[in-house]
Amino acid sequence: MATFLQRVRLTLDMIKFEHSIFALPFALTGALLAWQDRGFPRAGLWWKLLWIVVAMVAARSVAMAFNRVLDSEIDARNPRTKGRHLPAGLLSERFAWGFIVLWTVIFLAASAALNSLCLKLAPLALAIVMFYSYCKRFTHLAHLVLGFSLGIAPAAAWIAMSGSLDPRILWLTAAVTLWTAGFDIIYACQDYAFDVATGLHSIPQRFGIPGALWIARALHVGMLACLVMLVQAFALGALAWTGIAAVACLLAWEHRLVRADDLSRIDAAFFTLNGYVSVVFFVFWASDIFLA
């Protein structure tokens, strides 16, 4: 049992379980927008949100574990990633596959608990989030595919809450897609030399690090524009606008931390600030929705 629990702990560390925070606040925002827009009663709201959290965590766990399994051979050749759990032999692929199957079952169960449309769309959602792991092998747009994998979360949460899809929530899908793609491009800059040497596809590999950082900046400006459209689409108030301003400041700070000739602070830009972006966004927008 001790060995099994140690493997579970290592697996959660492998998939960076704590980073589920990145997309989860945006998903919860999508759910709250649906709740407010449709005028649903508060009774049952927290139960719905709980199942949405379970589904989100499960889908991300499947995607991350699958990515680690699929990339284990590549990770073993990359000096930056050769110490990861699978290439380092800390975990077996068999155990990782068992973890993937377990969380797939949990995701399907959570989808079924939400509504029938969520259950019908669950296999498509898993296909999208797992497809990303193949993309670096054939397209420079892998960052956008990853962005879309997270971007579907708010739309999925809207469906979970209402049982249908409203096109207005796609502004939030677009915002999350652009935000994620932007910070993933920044993160990929540290693998520039390895990607060039091995022929793996990425924006830094295609445009160089300076060009990639400019593309990341443009994507984050696009994210802010999508959030502005979302505020207008739902006629939200001052707190939502303040949330956008706060996100803009955090993104500006993120881009100040990383320069083409100094990538030493990428971890702070990637992990810390993007966690702040999602949480700060949610606090302001959830407050605006509940206080409306």
Image (cartoon, grey):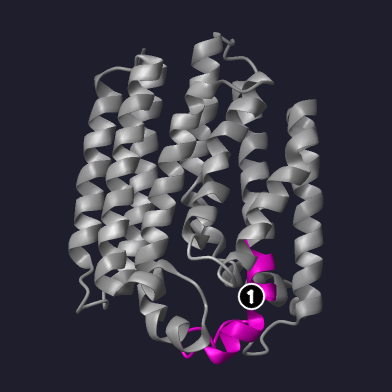
Q: Is residue 153 magenta?
A: no
Q: Is residue 243 above or below residue 83?
A: above
Q: Residue at x 62, y 45 (%)?
A: 56
Q: Quadrant of residue 184?
A: bottom left
Relative depth, front residue between 25 and 71: 71
Q: Residue at x 80, y 41 (%)?
A: 109
Q: Is residue 136 above or below residue 26?
A: below
Relative depth, front residue between 270 and 202: 202
Q: Quadrant of the N terminus?
A: bottom right
Q: Secondary structure at mark 1?
A: helix
**Residue 178, percent from left and from top:** 40, 47
Q: Which residues are magenta?
A: 64-86
Q: Relative to residue 202, is residue 58 drawn left or right?
A: right
In the rendered picture of this protein, how many numbered marks are placed on residues? 1
Relative depth, front residue between 269 and 50: 269
- Asked if residue 271 shows in the view, the reply is no
Q: Is residue 72 magenta?
A: yes
Dot 1, crowdedness within 10 Å: few (<14), some or many (≥20)? some
Q: Quadrant of residue 237?
A: top left
**Residue 273, percent from left and from top:** 31, 56
**Mark 1 — residue?**
10
**Residue 251, percent from left and from top:** 25, 51
Q: Residue at x 64, y 26 (%)?
A: 159
Q: Amino acid at mark 1?
A: Leu
Relative depth, front residue between 183 and 91: 183
Q: Quadrant of the C terminus?
A: top left
- Asked if residue 69 shows in the view, the reply is yes
Q: Is residue 187 above or below residue 6?
A: above
Q: Relative to residue 89, is residue 222 drawn left or right?
A: left
Q: Residue at x 71, y 50 (%)?
A: 126
**Residue 203, percent from left and from top:** 40, 67
